[in-house]
Amino acid sequence: MIALIQRVAGAHVSVDGETVGAIGQGLLALVAVQPADGEPQTRRMLERLLGYRVFADDAGRMNRSLADTRGGLLLVSQFTLAADTRKGMRPSFTTAAPPEHGRRWFDRLVELARAAHPGVETGRFGAHMQVHLVNDGPVTFWLET
């Protein structure tokens, strides 16, 4: 499982002009599921999303996590993160999970996140989405499990 996380002052995702998920301060996580992903990878990704220290403490150092700040978490499926871009001029998606596998484990990530943390929002799996964000920093990290 791959997540590109961005610390945001705010973010929202819309489908056909309708906002389907929105958060204030927190993390936007663009998430890709890979073919070998299952329960262990999903649980580890959630642990990392909630525990990764990217928010400032009183001294201005990145020592606080999303769990510490109780900020929002916007989860957006994005299979293109799993693309193989090493060759040619067009990405290959053979390294991304098939849609049914991707949906299963993305939905499980959302389920676990909502049970563990307040303020979890999502995009719409498989939809053409517009993601709007104000990256705070900018602070962006690539996480893998």
Image: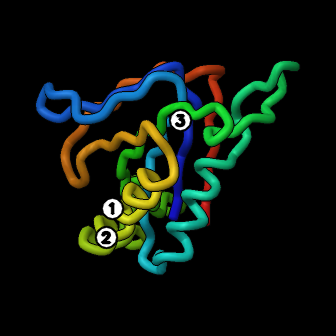
Q: What amino acid type is highlighted by mark number 3? A: Leu
Q: Which residue is mark 2?
A: 104
For the C terminus, the image quarter is bottom right
The residue at the point 63 percent across, 23 percent down is 138
Q: Residue at x 19, y 47 (%)?
A: 127
Q: From mark 1 to mark 3, how far is it between C-alphas?
A: 18 Å
Distance between the alpha carbons at the discs numbered 2 and 3:
22 Å
Mark 1 highlights which residue?
107
Say few, some or many: other residues with alpha carbon within 10 Å of mark 2 (under 14 / 14 to 19 / 20 or more).
few
Left or right position of 11 against 62: left
User: What residue is rendered at 33% in x and 67% in y?
Assistant: 102
Which label number is shown at residue 35? none
Cβ–Cβ below 8 Å for labels 1 and 3? no
Residue sitting at 54 percent across and 46 percent down? Answer: 4
Q: Above or below — where is 98 with respect to 65?
A: below
- Asked if 134 appears above or below 30 in the picture, the reply is above
Q: In the image, 4: left or right of 18?
A: right
Marker disc for residue 27: 3
Query: Where, by quadrant of the figure, is residue 129 drawn?
Result: top left
Return the x and y of residue 57 as percentages of the image width and height.
80, 25
Q: Do residues under tags 1 and 2 come within 8 Å of each other at their CB atoms?
A: yes
Q: Position of residue 9 (x, y in %)?
A: 52, 19
Q: Specify whether 20 is left or right of 115.
A: left
User: Is disc 2 in contact with disc 3, using a CB cutoff of under 8 Å?
Assistant: no
* Residue 109 in sight: yes
- Examine the rendering and report whether any part of residue 88 can be seen: no
From the viewer's perspective, is 8 left or right of 120? Answer: right
Check disc 1: other Cα within 10 Å, few if <14, some if 14-19, many if 20+: some
Whole-number angstrom distance, CA of label 1 to CA of label 2? 5 Å
Nearer-N-terminus badge (2/3) = 3
Q: As shown in the figure, which amino acid type bears the numbered disc 2?
A: Arg
The local secondary structure at tag 3 comes to: strand
